[in-house]
Image: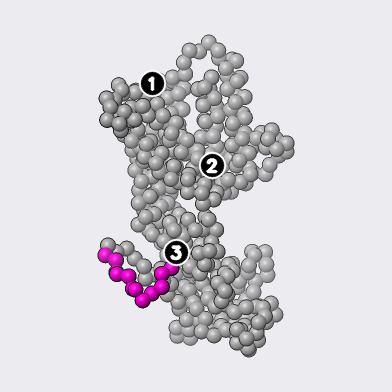
Amino acid sequence: MAFRLLFAVGGSALVVFAYGNVIGLNLLIMPLKSALAQVGSVLVRGNRVVVDTSNSGDTLGDWCALAGCLLAGIAAAILWSALDRRRDNYRSAARALFEVARIGLVVELIAYGLAKAIPIQMGYMTQPAHQLPLVGDLGLKDTLWTFMGASDAYSIATGLAEITAGMLLLWRRTWLAGGLLAIVAMAQVFLLNLCYDVPVKIVSGTLLATAIALTLPHWPNVARVLTNMTPLPPRRLWPAPGTRSVRIGAASLGYFVVLAHTALIAAIAVPAIIDMHSPRSPLDGQWEAISFTVDGVPAALTGQEPGPWANVAITDRTDYTSFVSQTPQGATTLWALEISDGTLAIRQRLSDTPTNIRYRLDGDTLVLTGTIDNHSIEGLYRSRVMERANSHFRLVQPGPDDNLPTS
């Protein structure tokens, strides 16, 4: 009965949340996810739920789908037990579940690892749009993303750990080492997602549970090795089901999925990282105000809205275009941006009518003029180098300056 529950509940969660996160398979699995979400929602909430097809993660529909996996899995296990009472073991089915879980875990580990090893997952946090907000104004997720994105070296190291775990899982003699490394890597990811409110808790939790389930039978031996005791005899995997040709075909299909998805992620990530860090115009960067007037009066003297834009950040890169304004008090506003000849069309919401701000570059000075809330504004800006640009890795730290106050 325990195995039937594991197979029905764990297998459905694995398919919906691990394989459902694989490019190309997500569209095929979405109908199953939607059906399970309705089952979970009706039984738990008493009504239906809208399922987000964008696969954004941790939506109400996702939690209802998880509840649906649990409830439908329990029902399936009970029915299975009633119809198959005479079977004395499920070793072949257990091996099949093991292989499906292993390949799914490998695909996700390598995919997420590549997104960090080719630092694209959090790399956009180094763009101008994310340099102006005060640390205290950042949400938990943005705080974590800023921390990870600030150091490519650390991002690459964490990505390589996930890739290594995935690669080790592929081979018969190293899969246990890969599974144990996957537990460490995914435990950190799951804990960060949980504590920093990153909306990938279900997927990371599923991958962590998968790594634990794969390695659990071998924990007694691992514990004896770590405590310097004589190991137990090695545990061998049960034979895979089907004929030799079926097993070879299934293994080939699994390796093909791993290679194809890895190649696809790499093909997407490499040009994306280039576009992410390639400014398209001199406007791209952070700018601090030299002067700012509202209706011809210095803004500091008006005491009315619109307040002065003490700093602005313009991101002008392929697929990353935005305008950020900052008040003297440090509050920032993110604007959608479209750049045309001499004009910045900005809007706070995509459905808003755009506000046109005229710009020109006079040498190193950026001049912005336009009308905000029926008031004429004009700002003169110079390029601003952020302190982070002067921070770098060093082995020898300079001595403290005793003349500076401590923070």
| Disc 2: which residue | 202
**Magenta-drawn stretch contains 10:** no
The C terminus is located in which quarter?
A: bottom left
Please state the horizontal and vertical placement of residue 206, each as a whole percent of the image: 50, 38
| Badge 3 amino acid | Thr
Q: How is the image coloured?
A: one colour
How far separated are the C-alphas under marks 3 and 2?
27 Å
Q: Is residue 370 left or right of residue 315?
A: right
For residue 27, what is the image quadrant?
Answer: top right
Q: Which residues are magenta?
A: 396-407
Q: Which mark is residue 161?
A: none
Please state the horizontal and vertical placement of residue 259, each as a whole percent of the image: 39, 41
Q: Which mark is residue 239?
A: 1
Mark 1 secondary-structure assignment: loop
* Nearer to us in this view, 97 or 31: 97
| Badge 1 amino acid | Pro
| Disc 3: which residue | 126
Q: Residue at x 38, y 49 (%)?
A: 159
Vertical relation: 226 (above or below) 94? below
Precedes in sequence: disc 3 or disc 1: 3
